[in-house]
Amino acid sequence: MFDESLKSSALPKLAVWKFASCDGCQLSLLNCEEELLTVAGAVSIAYFPEATRGVVEGPYDVSLVEGSVTSPEEIERIGQIREMSKTLVTLGACATSGGIQALRNFADVAEFRSIVYAHPEYLSTLARSTPISAHVSVDFELRGCPIDKGQLLEVLAALVESRRPRIPTYSVCAECKRRGNVCVMVANGTPCLGPVTQAGCGALCPTYERGCYGCFGPQNTPNTAALSDQLVAAGMPPEVAMRVYRTFNAAAEPFRRESERQERAVAVAGKGAGR
Amino acid sequence: MADGARIIGREQLARLVEVLAARGYAVMAPTVRGGAVVLDEVHGVDELPWDVGDVQEPGSYRLTERGDGAVFGQAAAVKAIKPVLFPPDELIWRGHRSGTQFSVTDREGQPQRPVAFLGVRSCDLRALAQHDRVLADRAFPDTRYLRRREGVFLAAVTCADPADACFCTSMGGGPHPEEGYDLALTELVDPHRFVVEIGTELGAQVLAEVGSEAAAPEDLAAVRDQIASATERMTRSMDTDGLRDLLYASAESPVWDEVGNRCLTCMNCTMVCPTCFCTTVEDVSSLGSADAERRRVWDSCFSEEFAHIHGGSLRTEAKSRYRQWLTHKLGAWQDQFDALGCVGCGRCITWCPVGIDLTAEVAKLRAAAPLSVGGAR
C-alpha cells in the first residue's frame, strides 16, 4: 500500500506504449497485483490501453515502451512518443534488442511474406526488427522476456524518487551463486547461458536445475566466444551453439556476433564434409 | 596427531548430530543438493552423503558411487562455511522516514541459531582462519561476522580422497585438520569407524556426551597411512616461492591476454572461493514505502561495476579483472594480511564453467617472467 505520508500533490504522468510485441511486458505491470495500488498511488496512469479506456492527453513524465520497431508507421510513432515524454523507459527483449521477431534480420522478409500471406502487397513491413534505441534516445532499458516485475517496480521507484535504479548489469551467475545454487553447467553438464547473460531474473531457470536461456540479453562484458567454445567442446553441435543465441535477444550485438560466428563454423564444416 | 585420540562408530556419529542439535546448534553437514555435495542443515545422519564420491576437474563436477560406504569420501563441498558465517546478502540496518525525521528501526536482522559444522575440511578451517583475520582481527571488526563466528562448533574431518582440482599441500595445508577445530574425525572404512581427535574443552564435553572408546595404536597408524596416501595423490600444485614478487613483476605479462580471452567474467570463482570477501553496500527503498534498508551483498572483482569510479570503470577488460583477482589473492594479500589468500581447495578450478586453473596460470606467468622473479625453470 502506498504510504500516505509520502504523497505529493503532482503525481508523475505515466503512459504505456506498445510496439511489435506479445504484450507480456506491459502485462507485468498489471501482474503487480499486490503492488498495483502502490503504483497507482505513486504515479498517475494517463495512458495504458491494456488497463483502461481512459486517456489523459500528453505530454507525459514517464513513457514505458514495449515492443520493437518493425514497420515504417512505427518509426514515425516512436518519434512522436519521444517528443511528448520527459523520460522514456523501454521494457523487455523486443524493445531493448528487437525481440524474437528479429530472427527476420537473419533471413529474407520478402520470402516470408510471400509464403505466409495471400496478398503480401497489403503488408508494409521493414526488413529488420530493431530496438527502440535504434530510433530515439532511451533513458533506461529494462531487460527480460518478459521483464521481472520487481525490477519494473524498482525502476518506477527510482524515477519517482529521482535516484538511479538498482539494476545490475553483471552475469546471472552472480545472483545464482548468491542464491546458493549449484552450477548446472559444471555439476550436470547442462548448457547454460548464465555466464554471458545479464542478471535480473533471480537465476530463475538454474534454480530449477535448467540452463539459462539468455532472456535478459547479454551481460555488460559477455565472453560469448569462450562460452560457445566450451559448449562445443562438451559436445554441443555448432548449429545448436548457433541457435542458443537466436532466441529473444538474437539481435543483441554480442549474441548476433556469436551466432554468426557459429554459423560460419557450420558452413566451413559443411564444406569440409562435402569434399 | 594429538595424544588421547578416541574411536566412535556409525551409531555415535548419529549420536554426535543429536547431541549437537540438543545443544541448540543448527547442524551443517555434507549433503547432496542439486547434483553436488554442499554443506547444509541436516537433521540426522541419514541426510549425509553415504557412499557418495565426487570427481572434480577443471570446469566439471560429478557425483560417483564409492562402493566402500564412506560418508565423508568427497573433496571440498561447493558451499561450506563462507555462506553461513558471511551471508551473500545481509541487512545492515532498516530505517523509517516520518516527515523530515529519519530513524533506524533495526540493526540486528534475523537472530540466528549457533551453527555446528560437521565434516568441514582442513582447507575450510584454513579459509576460516583467513576470514577471521580479514573480518574480525582488525581495528574495525565486522560485528555481525563476529557474532555468528563466536558460537560456532567445528567438527572437521580428514580429507581421505582429494580431487583432481585439489592442491592444498602446496599452499601450506594438507588433508589432515591441524588446528582450529573442536573435534577432528578421520573416517576409516574397514571396519567402519571414526578416529576422533579433541581440539578444545567444548569438543571434549560434546564427545563425552556422545560416548567413545580409546583409539588403539593400529587406528592411529591407519590415520597416518590415510594422510600420507591422500597427500601423495594430490598431484596438482602451485609453486609459491617468491609468488608476490612474481605477480608484481608480471603486471604486463602476455599471459593475462590469453587468460582474459577465456575468462567469462561470470564471478563463479569468487563466489565459491572460501576466502574472497568483497562486498558492496546497497541502499534499498521500494515504491511508496517510507521504509528503507541498507544491505551488504557479495560483490566480485570480475564485475565491471566493481571498479567503477568517477568517469567509468578502471577494469573494462576481462584480463585486467583476472589479473586483479590473482594478484590480490596471491600477492597483495601477503602485504595486506601477511598470508596467502588461497588455501588450495580447488573450488575456483572446478566451478569455473570454462575450467580456468589458477595453478596453470601461475606456472605460465612464472615461465614468462624474467629469471630474477621466475625462479628455477
Image: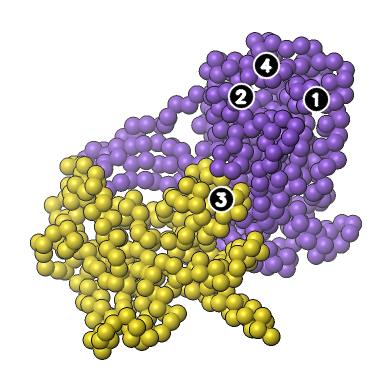
Q: Which chain is disc 4 placed on?
A: B
Residue depicted at 73% across the width and 24% down the height: B185
Q: CA distance from mark 1 to mark 2?
A: 19 Å
Against B55, residue B178 (above or below) is above
Disc sitting over residue B190 in the figure: 1
Residue depicted at 71% across the width and 50% down the height: B57
CB-based contact (under 8 Å), mark 4 and mark 2: no
Q: Would residue B298 be visible to someone looking at this image?
A: no
Farthest-out residue, right: B376
Name the quadrant containing residue A99. bottom left
Q: Secondary structure at mark 2?
A: helix
Amino acid marked by disc 4: Gln
Q: Identify the colour of chain A in the image.
A: yellow
Residue at the disc numbered 2: B45
Mark 1 or mark 4, which has the lower sequence index? 4
Q: Identify the colour of chain B in the image.
A: purple
Residue at the disc numbered 4: B12
Q: Classify 10 Å Cα crowding around label 3: few (below 14), some (14-19), many (20 and above).
A: many
Amino acid marked by disc 2: Val
Q: CA distance from mark 4 to mark 2?
A: 10 Å
Quarter holding the C terminus of chain B?
Answer: bottom right
On the same chain, marks 1 and 3? The answer is no
Q: CA distance from mark 3 to mark 4?
A: 35 Å
Disc sitting over residue A184 in the figure: 3
Q: CA distance from mark 1 to mark 3?
A: 35 Å
Residue depicted at 69% across the width and 20% down the height: B10
Q: Nearer the viewer, mark 1 or mark 3?
A: 1
Q: Residue B8: horizontal and vertical position, in percent? A: 73, 17
Q: Secondary structure at mark 3?
A: helix
Q: Nearer the viewer, residue B140 or B257?
A: B257
On the same chain, marks 3 and 2? The answer is no
Q: CA distance from mark 1 to mark 4?
A: 17 Å
